[in-house]
Amino acid sequence: MGNKEIIRRLVPCSLFETEKLENWLKDMANTGLILKSDGFHVTFATFKKSEPQQMEYRIWPENGINDYDNARHHRESYGWEYVSRASKFEIYRSSSPVAKAVDSDEKSETYLKKAVKKKGVFALINGFFNFAIFAVIGILIPIFIVSVQDGVFRSFCMASVFLCGSITSFAEAIKYKKLGANCTKQNADWETGALKHKTLNILKLVILIILFVILIVFKFDNPIEKHISSHESDPPFATITDIAHDAEYTLNNSSYFNTYTQWKTLAAPENYEWKESAKLKFADGTENSIRLFVDYHETVNPILAKAVAIEYLWEDKLSSYGYDYEKDLPDLDVDYGILYINQTGDYAVILQKGTKVIKTHFYALDGYSDELLYQWLETAASYL
């Protein structure tokens, strides 16, 4: 046939729908598109452009055999020419319109039924596996917290991958079950369902490309940790300085504390992680070293802010040290609030008002007082 123009076409149906594929390849030959040697690639096929030809095609499953050469010689002896391999199938053609049936055809049909059943079971198992992972991600990974901390893409893409995989696998399981029940009575019209099959293949490919771009190519900015003394203005939440008043305020020398990170995401345009350690010396001569951890988010929606607040609580409840018992919260002007003691005996508070949510851990190293604690709670709430 010489060097002809190469044409690629999406495969219109499953490999297990052998009669449809045979008729499709035959129709392609009638239009002058001849399947190229080793040109079948499961989702698409490569053709050489030629003159229209009358061509018969046959597709045989491998039947679990290992001696491919003998199988090919056997089929060639009946007038069939090997063209291409596709997964666990082999494609043959013949220019004779009365090419003989092969004496192993009945065994091939039996093997095809078993292969379809096996494929359906595998798709069903894969569907449950993907859904189980999706469920675990939804339960164990705080998606809303991740959405404000690392970005919406990173939080939802992983769950989307397994959800899409689950839906696709269940759909394939149903398809293979129907196909297995009618293996010997296939609808040989390849145009039936072709658009749906091609659309699903294109959709899966587009999803994979998008996920690849988001998870691999898309660059996420990692916030830089800075010393709190370099913060040019007051942060949008209460800090230790807000309860110092007339007390002498001195930052403790610590390589871990007195730093902050600030970043933006699509879900939350303003975010902070604040770690402060300072000593307060009061007018009566008493001193108290206080450590403060703050996670602050100003989200795009009050519902998201409430969801983040609740996830913060459940995250601590599920941890081995984050939650011990709840304390009474004073009357504060907030939409949601909870005060609790963690396993180390320190106070933690989560407050949410409108689009803002704050989670703080308050450590008074030289002893707590209700006055100091409530002063901090009221001050923290007043900033929301």
Image (cartoon, helix red, strand yellow):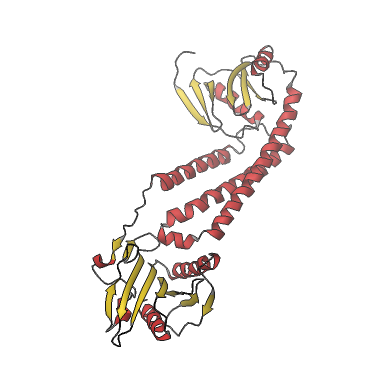
Residue 83 visible to the viewer: yes
Q: Is residue 98 visible?
A: no
* Of 144 and 226, the residue lying toward us: 226
Left or right for 77, reference 247? right
Question: Is residue 128 depicted above or below 333 in this figure?
Answer: above
Q: Residue at x 50, y 66 (%)?
A: 311
Counting from the top left corner in percent of width and height, residue 57 is at 63, 21
- 168 with respect to 224 (left or right): right
Q: Position of residue 294 (x, y in %)?
A: 38, 69
Q: Residue furthest top?
A: 77
- Total marks in image: 0
Above or below, comparing residue 57 to residue 203 in the picture: above
- Vertical comparison of 346 with 220: above or below: below
Residue 246 in picture, x, y percent from top left: 27, 84
Placement of 142 over or under 192, stated as above or below: below
Q: Is residue 181 left or right of residue 373?
A: right
* Residue at (50, 72) in percent of width and height: 342
- Quadrant of the image occupied by residue 381: bottom left
Q: Position of residue 2 (x, y in %)?
A: 46, 13
Q: Quadrant of the C terminus?
A: bottom left
Task: Give the image quarter of residue 138.
Answer: bottom right
In the foreground, 83 or 189: 83
Q: Residue at x 31, y 79 (%)?
A: 280
